[in-house]
């Protein structure tokens, strides 16, 4: 049975929702959750739930690495924080994966500091799930590396492919590079140099993808630098909110459409859900030497449950071993 | 009265919609339109309209620079194309502005080749209008320069501000740089170096803007490199289409919501219109030595009319002189 180390103090609504989510995950999946954090607080939360027969344990950690902590500093000083203690369970082989909805910069710093990189990987990449007509694409990097080199992008493409295969069950995922035109030769110097590397690689490379191709799902793994990737996810969030509001405003402005609008509301809500982070729960930090997933700070218990499920799938699918294997076969 | 040189052969539906749009513009605005293109074809189209009292003239050009022409080559060889002949009217001072819905790479090449840059401007930038709750923001560059330098971005910020002031009537426009975080120090090397320049400039600089801040309208002038800018507009188009389809699909899947959906449809259509290029018509190529606007290849007559209106406003507002003046006051 897979054992997941949960940073039970991480996230805006911890430890209430983290404990709730852990109980839910232990009931729904074949998984053991190690709740890492302040023992008394966690015990008090656990008592609110019926947990008999569930594989839940508490690992005490006296400190919390909070949203306002400077990641690089806290990763070295808050040694008894729930985030570091949970990461060390993975490092010691006492847990198969790590999940936190806390300070994501902190998770990145702690993962690099405690686990290090997979040998041969140049930079870890933060990943996002992007909704497409058939499910989700894997988008990376979304913020860990703002200035990239072509061979880093190639490694992102490889790691994204492995994640798509092992955790999302996509076979021979199509890999694309984000550019301002589909044709070879379009794009920045970085994109053009990366294109040449991808073409020579064993990835299922489908060429450049434009902005419009991302929601259309033309690639399963969408590779870009951390600045562009971050803009893509945050713009998508912002634009969705803008459009839903524009539609709601239109509906409120007329009487006939108001009736229609009220009746159509469940449809809006379901469409909105497509982009809802709580359905995804957690996204991986790829390239660190362990299975590490990060959730949204605003995670509710369902997001925590889904994040733990994602961590379990990535660990059970052998993601880390596959990245190491694949790397051995690459000319980098 | 402003005189606009229209590439009447440019666009997927030329010359029918270009002539229709020109007649419409001459009727709606205080403007003269010089229709540049194959005389016989244009005369035949003009005859379909009531044009008495309107300021419309035909300037013959025997060739067409089409969508499949290689811009850099055609700009030097198709000397009697409608695009080049129209551009030369601006160069000769016989027209105050240029508008084309044809090959946009061609317009860029022809503008650079025939008009050149405004003295002191390092690179021209292609601009887009981005819908915001209060109207539109100016986004640039959206594809002319994929690899940028910090001082180019500063010039884009200045030119975008001038365009926002003179053509869109926005006073002291707020200028932001696209980044992966709002704080100073977030972003790529390019963004960080540009931030320092913007901070020292006389622009109304509001700092970095994240992806979500763009549709929220947190800046009136949104500055970025041509790759990221291009991804922003094409992603917005693609995501809007994706969301509208998701909502339509949801509505079709249930009976109660189907009734609601049918009644709410006018609201959808109006929301969709917010992102409709035909409302905008044309966007400027800033930094070339003339007022040059580019429209969508799929432009209908309304888009042509609005594009001509935009060209008229930019010329009447003294955009070019303002760019030159503002440049003189900058430390570049």
Image (cartoon, coloured by chain):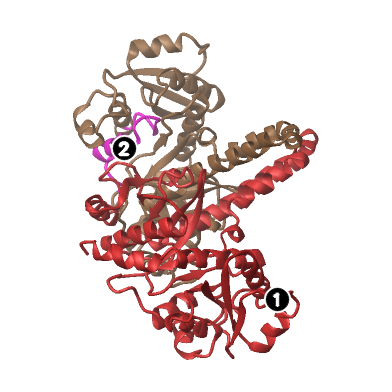
Chain colours: A brown, B red
Badge 1 vs badge 2, beta-carbon distance below 8 Å: no
State which chain disc 1 sits on.
B
State which chain disc 2 sits on.
A
Q: Is residue B230 above or below residue A133?
A: below
Which residue occupies the foreground of this view, A95 or A123? A123
What percent of the width, then of the height, locates residue A216? 59, 54
Quarter of image, res A328: bottom left
What percent of the width, then of the height, locates residue A78? 22, 26
Q: Per the image, is A100 magenta?
A: yes
What percent of the width, then of the height, locates residue A42? 39, 14
* Disc marking residue B52: 1
What percent of the width, then of the height, locates residue B287? 37, 69
Q: What element carries label 2?
A: helix
Q: Is mark 1 on a helix, strand or loop?
A: loop
In the picture, which quadrant includes the C terminus of chain B? Answer: bottom left
Quarter of image, res A128: top left
Region of the chain picked out in magenta, as a range: A93-118
**Residue annotated with mark 2:** A105
Q: How crowded is mark 1: few (under 14 residues within 10 Å), some or many (20 or more)?
A: few
Q: What residue do we see at 52% from left, 75% from top?
A: B3
């Amino acid at each position: 049975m897979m054992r997941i180390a949960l940073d039970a103090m991480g996230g805006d609504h911890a430890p209430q929702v983290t404990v709730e989510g852990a109980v839910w995950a232990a009931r729904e999946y074949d998984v053991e959750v190690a709740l890492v954090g302040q023992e008394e607080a966690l015990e008090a939360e656990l008592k609110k739930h019926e947990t008999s027969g569930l594989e839940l344990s508490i690992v005490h950690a006296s400190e919390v690495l909070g949203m306002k902590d400077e990641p690089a500093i806290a990763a070295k000083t808050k040694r008894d924080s729930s985030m570091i203690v949970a990461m060390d369970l993975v490092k010691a082989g006492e847990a198969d994966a790590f999940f936190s909805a806390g300070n994501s910069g902190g998770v990145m710093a702690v993962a690099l500091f405690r686990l290090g990189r997979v040998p041969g990987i140049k930079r870890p990449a933060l990943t996002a799930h992007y909704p497409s007509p058939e499910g989700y694409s894997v988008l990376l990097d979304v913020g860990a590396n703002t200035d990239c080199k072509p061979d880093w992008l190639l490694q992102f493409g490889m790691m994204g492919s492995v994640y798509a295969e092992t955790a999302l069950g996509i076979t021979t995922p199509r890999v694309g590079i984000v550019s301002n035109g589909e044709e070879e030769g379009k794009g920045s110097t970085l994109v053009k140099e990366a294109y040449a590397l991808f073409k020579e690689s064993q990835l299922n490379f489908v060429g450049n993808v434009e902005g419009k191709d991302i929601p259309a799902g033309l690639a399963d793994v969408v590779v870009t630098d951390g600045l562009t990737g971050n803009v893509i996810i945050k713009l998508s969030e912002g634009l969705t909110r803008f459009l839903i509001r524009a539609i709601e405003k239109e509906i409120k402005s007329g009487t006939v459409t108001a009736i229609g609008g009220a009746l159509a509301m469940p449809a809006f809500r379901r469409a909105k859900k497509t982009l809802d982070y709580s359905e995804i729960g957690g996204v991986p930090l790829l390239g660190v030497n362990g299975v590490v997933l990060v959730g949204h700070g605003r995670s509710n218990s369902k997001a925590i449950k889904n994040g733990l499920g994602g961590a379990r799938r990535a660990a059970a699918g052998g993601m880390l071993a596959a990245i190491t294997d694949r790397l051995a076969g690459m000319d980098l």
